[in-house]
Amino acid sequence: MKFVLLIAIWCYTTTAFAPTQKSRQYSPLKAAEVDNVGNNIAVKNLLSQVETTGLLTKVAQAGLLSKAQQSGVSLTKLEPLLALAASNKEVMILLEAAAPEALPILPKLVDLAPPALPLLGAAISIPPSVLQGAGAASFAAAAAGIYLIPDDTVIQVAAQTLLGGVLGVAVPAASVIGAGVLAKITKG
């Protein structure tokens, strides 16, 4: 019996040294499709969509750049932010990794951009202090909602969770970050 057990152990350990087929590893990122010149087809289609929708013309007609300049935002003031992003290797790695997955979203953004241009024009002219106040008011509204809504049913707890997530975290974070960016851009 011991002999059979020793043979079984010996056979099992020898399989560790036996050649095996290499398993194929698939990368989650697909190679970009390119045309015969080497242009990325998805990017080419996106730029064609921007051209056919007249997005840049609509940006000019909305006066978005003029409003930005009147608010103190200019491309030269954006340069330090771009340099900061370029010098931060982690940000660049995240952007490069997200690019293939984000590319299909961009045509949808181009479709949604024209109606959003007036909102962007209005948002640029908001002072940073108003954004910070809106964030604080949103947080206070979330706290009041969570306090005032009883937690007797699942729906009420879900409403509290939604209030806490949206008004208590997302809106204040966006307001504070937006106020910080606007303050840095308009002062820079």
Image (cartoon, rainbow, N blue to C red):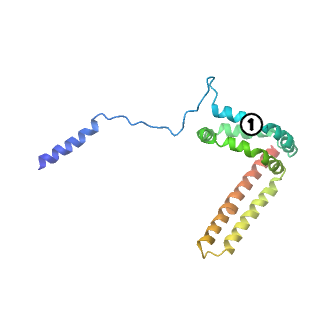
Could you classify mark 1 by the number of other residues whose Cα lies within 10 Å: few (under 14), some (14-19), or many (20 or more)? some
104 sits left or right of 23 in the view: right
178 sits left or right of 41 in the view: right
Establish if 158 lies above or below 64.
Answer: below
- Depth check: give the residue in front, 167 or 57: 57
Residue 64 screen position, x and y as percent: 84, 43
Residue furthest front as drawn: 52
- Depth check: give the residue in front, 17 or 32: 32
Establish if 38 lies above or below 175.
Answer: above
Q: Tell me the residue at 61%/23% (across/down).
A: 36
Q: Tell me the residue at 67%/74% (across/down).
A: 149
Residue 50 screen position, x and y as percent: 74, 36
Image quadrant where residue 81 sits? top right
43 sits left or right of 134 in the view: left
Which quadrant is the C terminus positioned in? top right
Residue 65 screen position, x and y as percent: 84, 41
Query: Which residue does the numbered mark 1 point to in the structure image?
Result: 50
Residue type at mark 1: give it: Val
Image quadrant where residue 185 sits? top right
SS of the residue under disc 1: helix
